[in-house]
Amino acid sequence: MKLAPEMIYSETIDGPWGPTTGSPLGERLCWRVNTARLVGERIDATLVTPGMDWIRLGTDQVRRQDLRVTLATDDGEVIMLSYDNALIRESPAFLAALSEGRETRFDDQYMRMVAQFDTGALKYRWLMQSLFIGEGRLAGPRTIEYQIYRLD
């Protein structure tokens, strides 16, 4: 199995709202996705409506993400991106950068996701015919970036 670099997903966020401390379902934070872009050799898409990123705060110091966004390609097609199989293992570097609005390197934290796409556009059907995983980092104040790879 090989990993082929396919695209970069970046977003800016507002929040958090929460946590829901004391909830019987566990603690959650919610971030609004204000801007997003998905760029690669075969795709260029931007956010068309604010998205949401729900984060479950585990007692094991792992953040489990559930993100959903709707994007429009530069040629007018609709692409839905979600990932609910995503983990952020906090590190001191990650927490400091998050609170100070600084960038991190990909290896400063364990930030991984499995991207799922949905589209009816034949031109972008390839998004639904492969598996995609991403490694993430903080890319500045309230900015997240994922390098997304296609599993060959």
Image (cartoon, rainbow, N blue to C red):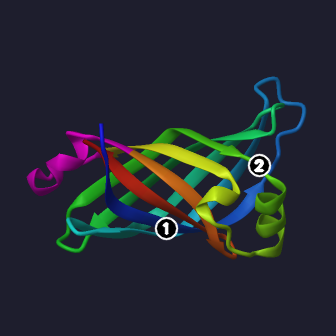
Q: Which mark is residue 90?
A: 2
Q: Residue at x 44, y 46 (%)?
A: 82
Above or below for 33 versus 140: above
Residue 120 visible in the picture:
no
> Tag 2 or tag 1, which sits nearer the N-term?
1
Q: Residue at x 53, y 48 (%)?
A: 67
The foreground one among 129 and 118 is 129
Q: State which quarter of the image contains the N terminus.
A: top left
Q: Comparing marks 1 and 2, which lies closer to the viewer?
A: 2
The reply, left or right, for residue 4 in relation to residue 34 is left
Q: Which mark is residue 26?
A: none
Q: Position of residue 71 (x, y in %)?
A: 35, 62
Direction front: furthest residue:
1
The residues tagged by marks 1 and 2 sit, at their Cα atoms, a distance apart of: 20 Å
| Identity, as a three-letter code, of the amino acid under mark 1 | Ser
The secondary element bearing badge 2 is classed as loop
The foreground one among 134 and 54 is 134
| Identity, as a three-letter code, of the amino acid under mark 2 | Glu
